Amino acid sequence: MSEENKCKCINKDDLLEQTKLNIEKFGLQVIMVTSTKYSSSFAYSIGLTKTFNHPEIICFGLPNNLAHEIINDIAKIVENGEIIENGKIYTNIFGNSQATFLKVDERNISNYFGAGINYYESEKFNALQLIWTDRNDKFPWEENFEEEFLYKQPLLDRNANFKFNEPKNLTTFTTRQWLEEQKPILRVIHDNDGDWQFLTGDQLPEDIRIVALEELVKRDETLNEVFDLDYGEEAERGFIDGQWTRNKIEYEDET
């Protein structure tokens, strides 16, 4: 019902025109977003709201061809008059396993539906997240769900106040100035080995402290804006609520 879009190969204006044409012709556009070393790939629809007055669909961690096919299959179900229900168990989405859908918290929309926001402009839209099970047909919130897949599909009906993929008690590095003097975090580093550093910019080596990731986000929810920094990336800003500038970390050559 649509043609796959490779987001990195098309600019914003051309993507918008292509999206409009595909929605007019097929009823929707499927957007594919490739994975990074840190974040899972995902795919989402644009147009279900306009064409069928139905929430858009998003899914994570599936091979591109499968994700594209699944979203088109769901669109056909919707086109035939069925409304996809939040929390209902479906056995007709995947061949040999269960699936369900979760209503995406509106605070998570902007992080994943960039092209959709560009298309709908000021018009708000809802979305449902397709959730798949592991090889034992268990959902991520069920006991003994396979740890290998635990962070392959972030659950967008929750965690709007804590968007990082890692556990809330993850050990991170920050500064004495943040901990004791309440100075703002102005630089965030996601090291190649997975460590996170949240720095005030005026620290010395002896000022480094260890805290749980959740404690940083509780004090400053704007840190959620850099939750998807890839390994080997950093972000800087001039003040809280300021625009983050992202860069690859330039490591000095080892001697």
Image (spheres, grey):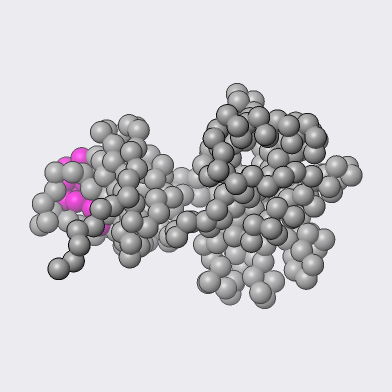
Q: Farthest residue to the front: give it.
A: 9
Quick check: can you spot residue 9?
A: yes
Residue interval drawn in magenta: 173-183
In the rendered view, would you say 160 is above or below 62? above
Q: Position of residue 10 (x, y in %)?
A: 56, 39
Residue at coordinates 67% horizontally, 75% vertically from top-left? 136
Q: Quadrant of the C terminus?
A: bottom left
Residue nearer the viewer, 168 or 67: 67
| 182 drawn magenta | yes
Q: Position of residue 155 (x, y in %)?
A: 57, 54
Left or right side of 159 for 229: left
Left or right side of 196 for 97: right
In the rendered view, would you say 137 is above or below 81? below
Residue at coordinates 36% horizontally, 47% vertically from top-left? 217
Residue at coordinates 30% horizontally, 34% vertically from top-left? 240
Residue at coordinates 78% horizontally, 71% vertically from top-left? 96
Q: Farthest residue to the right: give it.
A: 80
Q: Position of residue 45 (x, y in %)?
A: 69, 43
Residue nearer the viewer, 65 or 220: 65
Give the quadrant of residue 184.
top left
Give the quadrant of residue 60.
bottom right
| 188 drawn magenta | no
Q: Farthest residue to the top: give it.
A: 122
Residue nearer the viewer, 21 or 43: 21
Q: Quadrant of the N terminus?
A: top right
